[in-house]
Amino acid sequence: MDEDDYQTTPSKHLDRETLEGKRRHTAPSYLEHETASQQTMQGFAGGGDSHLERELAKRFASPDERLGAAASAELNSTFKGLARDLGRLANISGDLGSSIGIVKSSTELRDRVIRIRLLLRTNASDLFPKTVKRPTAASSYFSKTSKSPAAQHNGSGLYQKLDLEELPGQFKLLVNDIKFFISCLRDFPDFTDESLYDALSDFEDEAIYVSYLLSRHKGRFGDIAIKKYTQDLLTGRLGEPMEDVVASLVNFIDTGIQAIRSTQDQDATTSLTLTSLATFFSAVSATTLQYSFPNATTVLQVTVNTFWFCSLVFSIASVVNGLLAYMWKNAKYRSPEKYTPSWVLVWMNKIPLIALIISAAAFSIGLCAFAYSSHQNIVTSVLTTIFTVISSAGLVVVMLWFSFENWAYGNYDGTRWPLDVIPRSFRENAIVSLFFRTPPSSEIRQSTSKEANKEDLIEEEQFNFDFGCSESDSKSRHIFGTQEHVPDHAVAIDIEKASDAVRRLAPKELFYGLVALKVLLSRNRRIVKHRMQRVGRSLLMLSGMKPTRTLHSHETLVRHMQFSPNGRSLATCSWDGKVYIYEVKDLSSPPLTLDFSKEQDLLSHLAWSPKGNRLICKMLRGLSIWTHGGEAKTINRERSIESVTWFPTQSSAEHHQPDAFLSVEGSVVRKMNIYGEIEDEYVFEDITIHDAAVTPDSSRMICVATRTPHSESSICTSPPEVGNICAPIPVDRNEEMILLYNFDKKKTESCVPVVGESRNVKLAKNGALALVSYENQTPPQIWKISMTKNHSDGEDSDKVGHLLLEQTLLPKKVVDFAGPSHFGGEQDDLVICAGKDGTMYVWDSKTGFLLHEFDMGRFRAGRRMVDELTSLTWNHVSDTFMFCTGHVSGTVNVWTSKQNPITDTGPVRRGRKK
């Protein structure tokens, strides 16, 4: 499986500019291609206008699909590079001594990486079928490439079928393989590479965390949302650690293996040299014995024969043990040092040299005795004895010095030289000074080579798109922000293939087929024209918008703003402790002021009631409910309040009940009335709720939340038959999610994980779409609340809600978003969001196309604005487009359009085709 499987193949490492360039697809290009789309239109049987509109828009979502395929290809390339380098390591280290562990562990890790890579390719092909090809012939691939016992054993079962449900288990096994690989690396002699150990440890931590997250969604990997979550999670979590492992592996292969090979070659050369010397010495001993062994009558003659026979024995022992040590050190199946008995290590490493020294000493003693026993001249005998004693004494001193150096290094860890260990008084002795030279300094500075200064690396944050996952079993496909949701009753018809099939039908069937095709084509043209009118109307209104008034009431940062439901009032709050309520028709008049500056808490949120007669002013540990009559009710809470949201207007049967709202307080969401009485509580264990929104029928709420693992949380990474190895999950790693909660059942109906830090959610007027906003650089998303019949109960009224990703709203470049995003337009057909740099972005909510950008710098007479945006709100009831922006300086800018809204021209009349 190569990179050629991607029809759009990016480079191995895509830079930020390349990825950003793939996302630049704005509304003008979309409108230019609109006419051309009618000529290649596909027909659809069934489905509503909104469904057809999404289907017609999917052609222009190809940049998003290419972006997703590019990220998938980059991850696939990283996996492929890791597998390739692991294979290189296994091949190049096969001829080294004690290499069986590294060969086996690297081969098993390579097979695991290839298996996960194929699974991720399968997942990517489901997400991007037009760009990524589905991997095939996995079993033959493994049967040809994998020679490890594990791969051969599992080749008939594990590697024949690609099932995404095995991803959590594969990552658990990956953790085991990484642990085994690190253990074998540490056992590998003669070289230590801390950078490789650190990279593998980081990779192991990320694999443990990914396995922990994926294991929470077992049985749901057939859902498109889970596929997207998996793709984005692995891209964001594993990309950089794997690249570090690949870089460290390449360095280890290029330098580490060569250093190990050089060390082992040097040991082999030493062993062979000792063997050669011992062989030569044994020949000398055997030759000299020919002159002495016939004579054994005197004590000196017996002494000569005894020492020379011993010399011959030890020289032969040195030869044999030297050859044995040479073969043992170069054997790939040699046990690592810590698994080898100490006497074996001493015997293999020391005995050849010791035996050679003993052989030389015995030969020298026998030679001295032979000089006397053979009645040589006295001068010859004396000089032979003197020179033998001197050479032997020097040999003993050198051996003692070698032993002393070894002892000094072991006791002082290499921080002091052996000469520095000897006392100065002993070294200054007149006799000893003949043998020792005093160094210039008595102390050597402690080496700091082991603790090298680490440079601080400022890493540029990568733009990570977060895609959620869904529990829905419906067949759907998400293409980086654009979802193609195909109900069971809707069938996409390829016009050309359908035409070929129609020609083979009977005349009656042919007539009905042609009529159906004509109806579908005319309906598609009507939808296209309607969409062009809607988008064109929005573009015209947006192009004429500019800031028409600036409000300077606040002194510090504007924290939140909101228009009243009827659009007549604008409420703003700031960290100066004041709330101002303006009349929209007369913004120049003094606003109504609510002063909370005496309160200890900071104002952070405003919420108008559905009728617009009450306003909640939320603080950190309390809230105040203000009415148009001037009354204010303060409700103190002993805990932090994340957000508040009103329940929709009560029905006529329940009109006597007071208005209610939700108070989000950590892991508990409380339903309260305007008098501060708690009507109900909804508890979420181990989950912190950040924001919530209630559906129009008051039956459900959608929440953005964070799950925090317990400090004692652990994940077992070994099967029971092997023995459980539980690795702790870092408690600072949270799991972000979106929840759909049923009030009546007090049960979470749908839970989809996301990668970004979700902090705000808003519902459209129809209650079917939810706009989720994230912190930092994660773009907003539109989620659909889909109601499906509960198969466990045949009643139509019993339905279950599911969350489906509709759109991911992508800007042209990486943006640091400021505050939550908002629906805009009369029918929530726009989405507006602001960046901290002063740029505002407007998307079409139906297609996800970026329609317009507002650059605040343009409206400052050529001077770039440095006042960061903090909040944004849209007036849904205004005759013309209107929204407001809040800034760090405390100013509020009111944006309006001078263009009158363009009304629809009515239904499209279909004329005859000439």
Image (cartoon, rainbow, N blue to C red):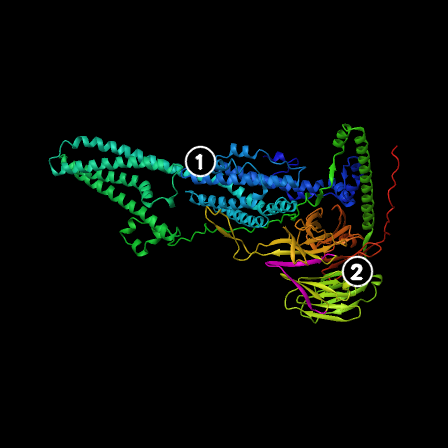
Residue 554: image quadrant is bottom right
Please state the extent of the stretch shown in magenta in the rendering.
675-695
Rendered view: 521 above or below 728:
above
Q: Amino acid at mark 1?
A: Gly
Q: Residue 693: within the magenta?
A: yes
Looking at this rendering, what residue extends furthest in the top direction? 504
Q: Amino acid at mark 2?
A: Pro
Looking at this rendering, what residue extends furthest in the front direction? 794
In the displayed structure image, the side of residue 211 where residue 440 appears, left or right: left
Q: Residue at x 27, y 38 (%)?
A: 356
Nearer the observer: mark 2 or 1; the answer is: 2
Residue 715 visible in the current orientation: yes
Q: Could you tell me residue 763's position as x and y percent?
A: 73, 55
Rendered view: 900 above or below 155:
below
In the displayed structure image, the side of residue 626 where residue 15 appears, left or right: left
Q: Could you tell me residue 736's position as x and y percent?
A: 62, 53
* 3D distance between C-alphas at marks 2 and 1: 74 Å
Residue 617: image quadrant is bottom right
Q: Which residue is mark 2?
A: 565
- Magenta segment's dominant SS is strand
Q: Secondary structure at mark 1?
A: loop
Q: Residue at x 60, y 59 (%)?
A: 685
Tally of numbered discs: 2
Q: Which residue is mark 1?
A: 94
**Who is closer to the viewer here, 117 or 196?**
117
**Who is closer to the viewer here, 432 or 638?**
638
Q: Residue 107: within the magenta?
A: no
Residue 881: image quadrant is bottom right
Q: Earlier in the sequence, mark 2 or mark 1?
A: 1
Residue 556 visible in the current orientation: no
Rendered view: 800 above or below 149:
below
**Where's the N terminus, which quadrant?**
top right
